Amino acid sequence: GTLPTTIGSCRSLKEIRLDHSKISGMIPTQIGQLSNLQTFEASYTELTGSIPSTFAYLSKLLKLGIHSSKLTGTIPPSLGLNNTALQRIRLSGNMISGNIPTEIGLLPSLELIDFSSNNIQGSVPSQ
């Protein structure tokens, strides 16, 4: 199955864990409406498309893990703007390209970045 666009109406949702599932399709932009979301884990899935820039609206997000899936596109610079609680970003093993946005270096709580096994260029920005 896919993540429905109606997921945005589940405002009290704190965790989404879809690891090792057969979930496919794109991550809906409505994910940005989940203002209480702290964890989004969807590794080893069939998710495709880009990382929605609306992840920037998730100010309580602590962990973002979508590794070993089929994501494409670039890392949205907006990911580094409002996600001040973000501690872990794991996007390894996808088909993401482009540069690491300098905005990622502005995340004060960041403890782990894993962009390995992609087509990403440049260095990890410092704070």
Image (cartoon, rainbow, N blue to C red):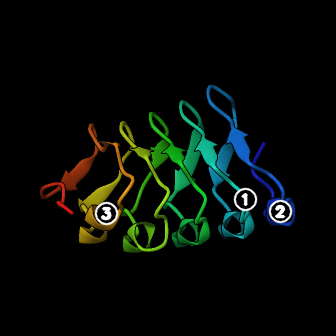
- Establish if 84 lies above or below 20: below
Of 16 and 127, nearer the camera is 127
- Establish if 41 lies above or below 61: above
Residue depicted at x 53% and y 70%: 56
Quadrant (top left/top right/bottom left/bottom right) for the N terminus: top right
Of 122 and 60, nearer the camera is 60
To which residue does mark 3 refer? 104
Residue depicted at x 24% and y 61%: 100
Which one is earlier in the sequence, the residue at label 3 or at label 1?
1
Question: Hey, what amino acid is under mark 1?
Answer: Asn
Q: CA distance from mark 3 to mark 1?
A: 21 Å
To which residue does mark 1 refer? 36
Which one is earlier in the sequence, the residue at label 2 or at label 1?
2
Residue depicted at x 45% and y 37%: 67
Write down the quadrant of residue 74 in the picture. bottom left
- Establish if 123 lies above or below 89: below
Mark 1 nearby-residue class (10 Å; few <14, some 14–19, many ≥20): some
x and y percentages locating residue 124 in the rendered image: 18, 54
Write down the quadrant of residue 73 in the picture. bottom left
To which residue does mark 2 refer? 11
Q: Are marks 2 and 1 in contact (CB under 8 Å)?
A: yes
Judged left or right of residue 73, residue 69 is right
Q: CA distance from mark 2 to mark 1?
A: 7 Å
